[in-house]
Image (cartoon, rainbow, N blue to C red):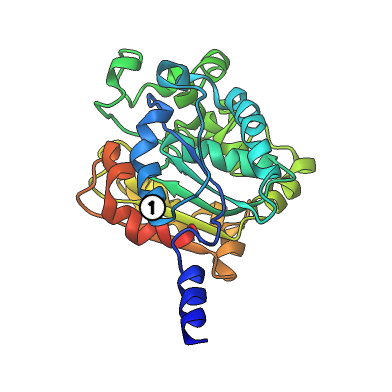
């Protein structure tokens, strides 16, 4: 009898004996899906047998495709994964992929995402000069690039223009930016639609956990606090206003404050991690990602 109990205990605790929720991973700007294989490997080692989907859409230069074109295409790619997972899925979005993921979750009425992990993503937009993108930007200073990005033409052809957030020209941002002010559910946006505002918020609040990961040595996301919904204040020499003092949080425009109130909002800050190394840094995975993939 004792031997039988030992066998049963061993069976119950075999790694992978219990299935884990599927994980969907969306790469960032100028990346390929295969660039996320290091992260997928960490998941497989920690949770053997996990069904992992790397989204092989809008890779490399195609990642500059405007985001409202990317969102529905990626939604249709991940929908079958969700439909086959009765207990839900986890989704990880890296860099631009994290912002795209947020738009997907806001616009997808039937998603079943448990944890949404935003890995160094410009959730409040991007403003700054970074060598990572310099070869692909028009040859004008970043302080004047709003003249290009805040046009109907560039909003239709260039993803970065969709979340360029010039703090000195908010009026232009609200007038021309078809993406970031919309997913932020800001009434001031020219493209704000009151009939979908509550639905966006309701959809986003379907998630059980929102995990925000970033750090001061990122070197690409500017300010780096954008990865945690902080952003520049032009009235105080571009100091950064943290998430809890942002309009999107104070007014709970799409659910940030609601998530925080129910204990579903989690922030992790790591020093010494360069932007292109987030998905391959084991310490980041162990402390900030793996705990939310159960």
Q: Residue at x 24, y 26 (%)?
A: 131
Give the quarter of the image for residue 146: top left
Residue furthest to the right = 195
Q: Position of residue 69 (x, y in %)?
A: 61, 22
Toward the viewer: 235 or 255?
255
**Dot 1: what SS?**
strand
Neighbour tally class for label 1: few under 14, some 14-19, many 20 plus, Cα within 10 Å: many
Give the quarter of the image for residue 127: top left
Give the quarter of the image for residue 33: top left
> Is residue 78 found left or right of 232 in the rendered image?
right
Q: Position of residue 133 (x, y in %)?
A: 31, 23
Residue furthest to the left = 272
Instruction: Note whether residue 180 is visible.
Output: yes
Q: What residue sits right under mark 1 in the picture?
A: 213
Toward the viewer: 63 or 146?
63
Instruction: Note whether residue 186 is visible.
Output: no
| Picture mark count | 1
Q: Position of residue 98 (x, y in %)?
A: 48, 41
Q: Residue at x 37, y 36 (%)?
A: 37
Vertical relation: 152 (above or below) 171: above
> Is residue 59 found left or right of 287 in the rendered image?
right
Q: Residue at x 61, y 63 (%)?
A: 258
């Amino acid at each position: 009898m004792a031997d039988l109990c030992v066998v049963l205990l061993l069976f119950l605790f075999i790694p992978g004996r219990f299935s884990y929720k599927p994980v969907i991973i969306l790469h960032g700007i100028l990346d390929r899906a295969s660039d996320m294989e290091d992260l997928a490997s960490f998941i497989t080692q920690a949770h053997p047998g996990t069904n992992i989907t790397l989204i092989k859409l809008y890779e490399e230069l195609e990642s500059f495709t405007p985001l409202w074109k990317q969102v529905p295409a990626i939604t249709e790619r991940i929908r079958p994964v969700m439909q086959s997972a009765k207990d839900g899925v986890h989704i990880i979005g890296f860099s631009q992929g994290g912002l795209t993921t947020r738009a997907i979750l806001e616009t997808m009425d039937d998603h079943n995402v448990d944890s949404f992990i935003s890995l160094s993503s410009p959730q409040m937009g991007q403003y700054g000069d970074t060598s990572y993108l310099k070869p692909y930007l028009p040859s004008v200073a970043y302080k004047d690039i709003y003249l290009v990005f805040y046009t109907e033409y560039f909003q239709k052809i260039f993803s970065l223009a969709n979340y360029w957030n010039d703090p000195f020209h908010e009026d232009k941002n609200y007038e021309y930016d078809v993406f970031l002010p919309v997913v932020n559910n800001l009434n001031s946006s020219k493209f704000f639609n009151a009939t979908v505002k509550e639905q966006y918020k309701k959809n986003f609040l379907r998630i059980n956990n929102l995990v925000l990961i970033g750090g001061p040595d990122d070197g690409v996301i500017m300010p780096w606090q954008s990865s945690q919904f902080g952003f520049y204040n032009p009235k105080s020499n571009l100091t950064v206003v943290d998430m809890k003092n942002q309009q999107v949080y104070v007014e709970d425009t799409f659910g940030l404050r609601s998530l925080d109130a129910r204990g579903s909002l989690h922030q992790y800050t790591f020093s010494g991690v360069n932007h292109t190394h987030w998905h391959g840094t084991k310490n980041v995975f162990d402390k900030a990602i793996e705990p939310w993939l159960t």
